[in-house]
Image: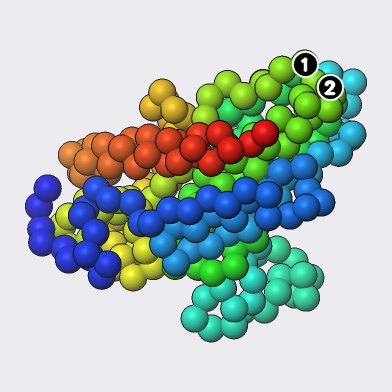
C-alpha cells in the first residue's frame, strides 16, 4: 500500500466499520432485519407473494426483486420523497436493479415455485455504502423468508446456493481502503463496489475513476480488500442467522 491516509475513526485500511445485524424487526414480514455498518443504517423487509412477473408465468421459476429508498433526513439535508416527486431517480433505479440481480444469483429460482420475494430496503441513516449494506442485509432477510417458506412446507428445501454480501472500497490519498464512509467516498480518487459469493466468485463490480484512471495493481488491491471484507460480513450473516429457531 502507498500513501498515508488517516481514517476519521482510526480504523486500519483493511478494517470494516462496526457491524450489527438485528433480525425480526418487522413482525408482519416473512423476513426482516436492521443492518448497521458504522453510521449507515438500513431497514429491510422480505415479502413473499404467490405471483410472478409476466415473463415468469408458467415457467415454474420464481422471482426476487428489490425496492430501495432513502428517507428524507437520512443525509445531512432533508431530501424530498421520490413518491411525492412522482418518479424514481436514476440512482434509485440502478440500486434497486443491483440488489435484485445480486440476490437472484444466490438462489435457485426453480425451487421457490412461481412466487415473488420482494426486498424493501429503506435507508434510515446514510454515511456511505448504502447499496452494499442493503445487499448484505437483504440477503439475511431473504434467507429468513425462505426458511419460513420451508418451515411452512411451501418448499421442500432452502434453495440458497451460497451466502452473498457486498462492500465498498476505494483509493484515498493513494491508499486502498475497505468499507468507505461518506467522507472517504467523497475524497476517493477511485471507488469500487463489490458483490461476491462466499467462495469468492464475483457477482458484480462497479469500479469508477473519480479523478485519474486507476491501475490494474490498484484494482487488484481493492479486490483483495473486498474479498477479505466480504468473508467477514458473511461470517456475521451466519452468526445472526444461527439465532433463528
Residue 77, percent across and down?
53, 83
Instruction: Give the side of residue 46 with respect to residue 220, left or right.
Output: right
Residue under label 1? 156
What is the secondary structure assignment of the residue under circle 1?
A: loop
Q: Residues within 10 Å of mark 2 (few under 14, many from 20)?
A: few
Looking at the image, residue 135 lies above or below residue 40: above
- Can residue 204 be seen here? no
Residue 213, percent across and down?
25, 52
Instruction: Name the residue located 18 percent from the left edge and 39 percent from the top edge.
Output: 217
Instruction: Say if mark 2 contacts mark 1, CB within 8 Å.
Output: yes
What is the secondary structure assignment of the residue under circle 2?
A: loop
In the image, 153 versus 85, the foreground residue is: 153
Residue 180, percent across and down?
34, 58
Q: Residues within 10 Å of mark 1 (few under 14, many from 20)?
A: few
Q: Quadrant of residue 244?
A: top right
Residue under label 2? 153
- Can residue 84 be seen here? yes
Instruction: Give the side of residue 82 with respect to residue 48, left or right.
Output: left
Instruction: Give the side of residue 203 with respect to residue 173, left or right.
Output: right
Residue 31, percent across and down?
71, 43
Instruction: Name the residue located 31 percent from the left edge and 65 percent from the top edge.
Output: 184
In the image, 185 versus 106, the foreground residue is: 106
Amino acid at each position: 500500500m502507498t500513501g498515508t491516509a488517516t481514517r476519521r475513526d482510526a480504523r486500519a485500511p483493511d478494517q470494516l466499520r462496526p457491524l450489527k445485524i438485528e433480525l425480526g424487526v418487522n413482525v408482519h414480514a416473512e423476513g426482516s432485519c436492521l443492518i448497521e455498518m458504522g453510521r449507515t443504517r438500513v431497514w429491510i423487509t422480505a415479502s413473499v407473494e404467490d405471483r410472478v412477473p409476466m415473463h415468469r408465468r408458467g415457467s415454474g421459476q420464481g422471482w426476487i426483486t428489490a425496492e430501495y429508498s432513502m428517507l428524507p433526513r437520512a443525509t445531512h439535508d432533508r431530501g424530498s420523497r421520490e413518491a411525492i416527486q412522482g418518479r424514481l431517480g436514476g440512482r434509485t433505479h440502478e440500486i434497486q436493479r443491483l440488489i435484485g440481480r445480486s440476490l437472484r444469483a444466490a438462489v435457485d429460482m426453480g425451487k421457490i415455485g412461481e412466487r415473488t420475494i420482494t426486498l424493501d430496503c429503506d435507508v434510515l441513516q446514510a454515511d456511505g455504502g448504502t447499496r452494499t449494506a442493503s445487499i448484505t442485509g437483504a440477503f439475511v432477510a431473504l434467507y429468513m423468508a425462505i426458511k419460513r417458506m420451508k418451515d411452512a412446507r411451501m418448499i421442500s428445501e432452502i434453495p440458497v446456493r451460497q451466502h452473498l454480501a457486498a462492500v465498498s472500497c476505494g483509493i484515498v490519498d493513494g491508499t486502498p481502503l475497505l468499507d468507505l464512509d461518506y467522507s472517504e467516498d467523497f475524497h476517493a480518487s477511485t471507488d469500487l463496489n463489490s458483490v461476491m459469493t462466499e467462495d469468492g466468485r464475483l457477482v458484480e463490480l462497479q469500479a469508477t475513476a473519480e479523478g485519474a484512471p486507476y491501475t490494474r495493481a490498484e484494482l487488484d488491491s481493492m479486490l483483495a480488500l473486498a474479498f477479505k471484507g466480504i468473508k467477514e460480513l458473511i461470517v456475521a450473516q451466519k452468526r445472526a442467522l444461527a439465532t433463528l429457531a
